[in-house]
């Protein structure tokens, strides 16, 4: 068992009106590793006036978590299968929409990895199997209801 920690810190700024919803959604997110990032509500949700440009929103963090977990699991499984990977880049994308229960959610995350191999490349069937295994073993994918699709470019 492991415990992971994150601290989220927000403060009302002078001149803002909390009761009327006129306040910045900017905040700090500090991770147990010591890293800190600027966080905000998505401009798609709250608009540009109250979100913070250049900060990361929770929806982006979810997509990045799924992408990173899949990548790390894929690298481990591919190495065990005897493939040598020299680069892995993913242009992941999350879709937020109304789900079957009528709630707004990230319903689909599409991973689009571009993988460079040194030596033999896995066949299309082998790649599909490796990605399937990675998805099955990814801790983050096992933790969410979001559909995750992998579209590796050949």
Image (spheres, rainbow, N blue to C red):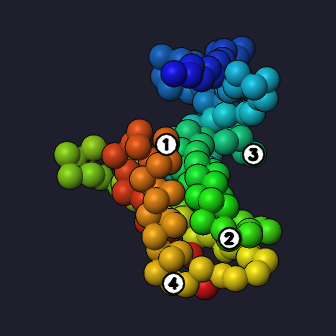
**Can residue 134 be seen in this snapshot?**
yes
The residue at which mark 2 appears reads as: 83
Give the spatial CA distance, label 2 vs label 3.
Answer: 37 Å
Q: Is residue 77 above or below residue 126?
A: above
- The mark closer to the camera, 4 or 2, is 2
The residue at which mark 4 appears reads as: 124
* Residue 12, percent from left and from top: 64, 15
For marks 1 and 3 on the same chain, the one whose residue lies earlier in the sequence: 3
Classify residue 70 by image quadrant: bottom right
Give the spatial CA distance, label 2 vs label 1.
Answer: 24 Å
The residue at which mark 3 appears reads as: 54
Query: In front here: 109 or 17?
Result: 109
Give the spatial CA distance, label 1 vs label 3.
Answer: 25 Å
Label 4 close to label 1 by CB (< 8 Å): no
Q: Residue shown at 75%/25% (left/top)?
A: 33
- The mark closer to the camera, 2 or 1, is 2
For marks 4 and 1 on the same chain, the one whose residue lies earlier in the sequence: 4
* Residue 19, percent from left and from top: 48, 16
Mark 1 lies on a secondary structure that is: loop
- The mark closer to the camera, 4 or 1, is 4
Label 2 close to label 3 by CB (< 8 Å): no
């Amino acid at each position: 068992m492991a415990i992971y920690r994150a601290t989220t810190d927000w403060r009302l700024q002078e001149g803002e009106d909390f009761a009327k919803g006129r306040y910045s959604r900017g905040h700090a997110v500090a991770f147990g590793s010591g890293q800190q990032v600027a966080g905000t509500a998505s401009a798609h949700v709250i608009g540009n006036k109250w979100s913070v440009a250049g900060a990361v929103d929770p929806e982006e963090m979810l997509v990045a978590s799924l992408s990173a977990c899949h990548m790390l699991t894929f690298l481990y499984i591919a190495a065990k299968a005897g493939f040598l990977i020299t680069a892995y880049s993913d242009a992941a994308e999350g879709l937020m929409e109304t789900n079957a229960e009528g709630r707004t959610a990230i319903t689909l995350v599409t991973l689009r990895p571009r993988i460079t191999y040194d030596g033999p490349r896995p066949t299309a069937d082998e790649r599909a199997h490796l990605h399937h295994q990675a998805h099955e073993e990814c801790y983050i994918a096992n933790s969410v209801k979001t559909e995750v699709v992998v579209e590796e470019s050949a």
